[in-house]
Amino acid sequence: MPRLLLAEDDADLGPAIKRALELEGYMVDLFLRGDDVFAAARANAYEVILLDIGLPHGSGLEVLRDLRAVGDATPVIVVTAFDRTQQRVAGLDAGADDYVVKPVDLEELAARIRSQLRRRDGRQNDSVSIGAVTLDFSGQVVQLDGQDVPLTAKEFRVLALLMRRSRRFVSKADLEAELYDHDNWAESNTVEVAISALRRKIGRDFIHTARGLGYMVGAQER
Amino acid sequence: MRRSTLSMQLYRRVLLLLALTGLALGTTLYLFAEREIGEASDAQLVNAAQLLSMMMQDELATGVLVQRGEVIGADGDPLLTREDARAFQASYDSCMFAVFWQGRLVAQSGWGAPVQLVPRRPGLQNFTAHADRWRSYGLLDGSRRLLIVVAQRHPARTSSVERLLSELGLPMLALLAVAMLVLWWTLRKSLSQVERLAATINARSLSDLEPLVPQAWAPDVEPLVIALNTLFARLEGAYELEQAFTDDVAHELRTPLAAIRVQGQVLQRLAPQALGEDVTRLMATVDRANDLVDGMLTLARLNATSLSIRSVDAHELVGEVVAEAVASLPVDAMEFSVTPDHIVRWPCDAALLRIALSAIVGNAIRHARAGGRLDIAIVRATDRLVITVGDRGPGIPAGDRERLLRRFEHGADGTSGSGLGLSIATKAMTLLAGSIRLEEHPDGIGLLVVLTLPALAEKALPGTVPP
């Protein structure tokens, strides 16, 4: 059972997140003060640390800097109400691995934790998961709910580009260029054919389209 | 009380001073001229008397009067011949004369004031004859028996002063008029520094609080420049305080909202089926409160936004906003289309345009989702960029459109929403010196939002109107 450290000084929010994450199957230790967080992180081996920035007795950023200074590389997700870019950058500069702005959506938080766990397992560079779909770049394998989905080379390339640029529209021209680079030819409807095949194989809800913009995959990472 | 401009006040005062100086100078000149002319006239009288005296020298020397011992009449008068009288008149045409021998009249000019009124005294005298004022000079010869009196009418004396005035008056008036014009022009010219200062301040963007350089201005306006710089510094401080306050508000409001939301999600998982709908409604209410907080923060931050104008791809920006919207919706909930399907570059502030577009698209998704379609068109003209967002929802009645652009105004459909979306878009467009219009969709169904952006010079934004 993965063990998490949760640092949150709000008397309502802290216990609520702890309870929710326990329902997700994590063991959660909740701390309210910055100095306690540092001591606990040094004493125990946590899989992921969830850190609020506005902690009493040592702000989240200070704790994070101190942890990194003593060589502690535990993945840290900063959870904060401050959403200004410069504060986001300050958090990442201090050594945070990810950044979540309140109000936190539990599903999103759980997904970010899973992502950190996967990263720790060394799987972060060759696969990406969006919704129920996982794409393994190196193995050229696509799984839907853990089941392999057989795809042609073109379909894989189209899906790979869409998933690399998830939550952004990819123009038809860009998709054609991606196919052209590999095959030296692309018929005018090659992209449409590949998209419709992908929709048939992994569900028609997965790929969004908008006229004038192109195609997009974009449900939040689960 | 009517306000008058500083320059007008100054102009009036300087003009009054000029008039008083001119008047004093004129009076002095007049008095001086009158005295000089009076003295010259008196000298003329003296000369005339001496001329007469010289004309009679020969007759006196021959002892005409003494020998005869009698009074000689005007005609056939051997004392002063007719030629002598004419010669005198040629030289002194305005002068009359009378000659007395031991108090008796022995010669006269025959014109001018009656002789009996002429003072029979030596020296300068004034007298009145037939309502005219006269001045006379009496010359007594060495024997003290012969008195020569020469007289001149006063009007003859003043006429020269009047002539002087009339000849000087017109040039003086012309000079005064020119002085008034030059004075006005000089004043305007000097005060144009103030106007230039105002124009410089006006041309600044809302967030440009850089101090002015005092050396770049005339020393007269330096106190104003320094005062403005102090004000700028204070405003800067106020903005920073506002930023800090905004961050505090964000933190303080978001944390309890986050707690409610997480507890709601926990409930959603654990609650019996019967409670499911209530929990969902609770979550929707919390999300609405979050939207409100987000909207307020966006609106507050817009006030403190500094613009950075650069060439932006409006098509890409629209694509990002639509992608965000699509990701938040169930698949196929709405159909989106964007024209054209290529890059449209335009100089503006990307962050502000994005905020405006997000607010408009978010508003359309909230209120017109049932319409199922959202069409966005980007049209570039030479002097402006127009982005239209058309939905197929219920639209907004013409009478409500103006009102809905204001803060916390809700439409008639009673749907949730922070009531801030359109006012955020309005604010952002105002900061971009652009405009937002709500229109009926050309097809008659739905709302068409028209965003118009002027071409902004990179970096600087002229004529920003403070909120």
Image (tube, helix red, strand yellow):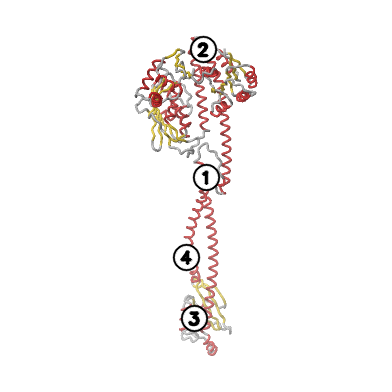
Label 2 chain ID: B
Query: What crowding class fits label 1: few (fewer than 14 Cα within 10 Å), some (14-19), or many (20 or more)?
Result: some
Mark 3 — residue?
B108
Of the numbered discs 2 and 4, the one sitting upstream in the chain is 4
Q: Tell me, yes or no, whether dots 4 and 1 are on the same chain.
A: yes
Q: Nearer the viewer, mark 2 or mark 1?
A: 2
Q: Tell me, yes or no, whether dots 3 and 2 are on the same chain.
A: yes
* Residue A206 in view here: yes
Q: Tell which of B315 and B115 is nearer to you.
A: B315
Q: Tell which of B120 and A88 is nearer to you.
A: A88
Q: Residue at x 55, y 15 (%)?
A: A21
Label 4, label 3: how many angstroms apart (C-alpha)? 35 Å
Q: Amino acid at mark 1?
A: Leu
Q: Nearer the viewer, mark 4 or mark 1?
A: 1
Label 4, label 1: how many angstroms apart (C-alpha)? 48 Å
**Quick one: quadrant of the N terminus of chain A?**
top right
Q: Nearer the viewer, mark 4 or mark 3?
A: 4
Mark 1 — residue?
B197
Q: Amino acid at mark 2?
A: Arg
Label 4 chain ID: B
Q: Nearer the viewer, mark 3 or mark 1?
A: 1
Query: What crowding class fits label 3: few (fewer than 14 Cα within 10 Å), some (14-19), or many (20 or more)?
Result: many
Q: Quadrant of residue A169?
A: top left
**What secondary structure is found at the residue carrying circle 2?**
helix
**What secondary structure is found at the residue carrying circle 3?**
strand
Relative to B151, is A127 above or below? Answer: above
